[in-house]
Amino acid sequence: MTKPADLSFVPLDLETIATAKGRVVVFIDPEANLDQAARRVNRLTKGALQRFVESDAFAKLEEGAAQDLAFPVGLEAEAVQVIRLGRRTTGEVARRAGVAIGRGLGAGGVTILAGGLRGVQDVALGAVLRAYDYADQKTGDKTLPGAITVMAGKSETLVDAAALIRARADGVFFTRDLVNAPSNVLTTTEFASQLEGLRDLGVEVEVLEEDALEKLGMRTLLAVGQGSESPSKVVVMEWKGGASEAPFALIGKGVVFDTGGISLKPAGGMEDMTMDMGGAGTVAGVMKTIATRKAKANVVALVGLVENMPDGKAQRPGDVVKSMKGDTVEVINTDAEGRLVLCDVMWYAQERFKPTGMVDLATLTGAIIIGLGHENAGVFSNDDALCSGFLKAADAEGEGAWRMPLGKAYAKQLKSRVADVKNVGGRPAGSITAAEFLQRFVKDGTPWIHLDIAGVALTSDESPYAPKGATGWGVLALDRLIADRFEG
């Protein structure tokens, strides 16, 4: 698995700047003032830094943007990276500055001259998150990123911050690796094995096999995977960091590959359906983060792991299957399979754990991409307070999220002639009717959020904190939601 770059906060040492390897980063505020460290770099480079700061190139830089001065005279570093950033800037802009650092991080590492920069933790997090490269399937020598050394004022107070950044990056990288992995590598069995590894962090992990799922009545989930040679599974993960209160539940769709089944997808782009387990991948990353940082909360996570393949045994359009809840579902389209997985897992989670709230995540619909593009996940909820808390957390973490409507008029589109409900309601409002289908399996009194992450789980271009490919979207926001909601 991909490991985040080593991160450390150390005191500012002006004497070591000249001999620092790799890259050196300096911050210049929009007024073009040089702090103590920048003045030292300027002297070492015989005024080159000051000349750049006085140039039109610096004036045109947006806040948080960077420019390299390559192979500077007077320094052993291969480059000085100049970043325009106000000394008191925090949040998204500071993280964007960190992303610029992480994007250029090489084997030689980087020394960040932060001094008294207020947003130093955000800069460090952005740098660690962006310094990611999925190379598990590549042969030959692999270039690992060097260490990130942050020279900061009062660095002794940032020890806990460094540990938290590492914990959060561990979770995000776990999610990215899972989502990036090809489906012949990340089978349902291998996925379950990866999740069992969380036991090393104190997570209780239970794997429910097909015979157990059959006894529980999870027929809609099993129907999705019945055309595949890979066995369907449900993995239950429990983190017991709180007192005796009921847990908060996270539910993830884990379709390790989605051909569409008998309702076969077009060939073009089908290779991207390795990411259709993105909801389960995000849930796994959140559990890794909260376990690593020893969150003082009770959280249970359940993921349904299946593969949707066309086969003589595969479910057909027109089939009627019974859910664990007892509702019968007419399968109109076998490519609308994620909701069939989630509805059984959601019902089981409520029956067994009686959670204080529930969030499900799924790369569920192409319709959400038409509506929101790749900038925002779709957020659907039956509880304003829980939804507001999540949107606040997502905004604080720079993870785009937009609330979408629900309503009985949409639910009417799911009315079936032969069963209790259809699994699709036609083209109009496709992401909303999918959420309405799921809401049918939410018990009265259970606060619930459905996150449709089809547009944000994996992107063809660079995303705010990641290179193209899996983003790890949602790990940061859900970790913050849990901290805000249960840890004060």
Image (cartoon, grey):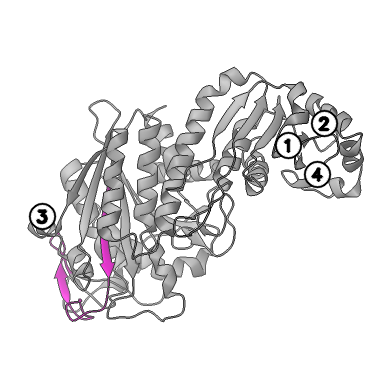
Q: Amino acid at mark 1?
A: Val
Residue 104 x/y as whole percent:
67, 48
Labels 2 & 1 near each other (Cβ < 8 A): yes
Question: Given this view, does label 4 or label 2 mark the residue nearer the observer?
Answer: 4
- As drawn, the label of residue 71 is 4
Residue under circle 2? 41
Between the C-alphas of marks 4 and 3, the distance is 62 Å
Whether the magenta-drawn stretch holds residue 112 is answered as no
> Toward the viewer: 391 or 261?
261
In the picture, which quadrant includes the C terminus?
top left
Earlier sequence position, callout 2 versus callout 3: 2
Between the C-alphas of marks 4 and 2, the distance is 13 Å
Q: Tag 3, which secondary structure?
A: helix
Residue 85 x/y as whole percent:
74, 38
Question: Given this view, does label 2 or label 3 mark the residue nearer the observer?
Answer: 2
Q: Amino acid at mark 4?
A: Phe
Labels 1 & 3 near each other (Cβ < 8 A): no
Q: Bin the neighbour count of mark 1 within 10 Å (Cα to Cα): few under 14, some 14-19, many 20 and up.
A: many
Apparent side of residue 452 relative to residue 297 in the rendered image (left or right): right
Q: Bin the neighbour count of mark 4 within 10 Å (Cα to Cα): few under 14, some 14-19, many 20 and up.
A: few
Residue under circle 1? 24
Look at 36% across and 29% down and name the residue there. 294
Q: Tag 1, which secondary structure?
A: strand
The region drawn magenta spans 301-328
Q: Amino acid at mark 3?
A: Ala
Q: Tag 2, which secondary structure?
A: helix
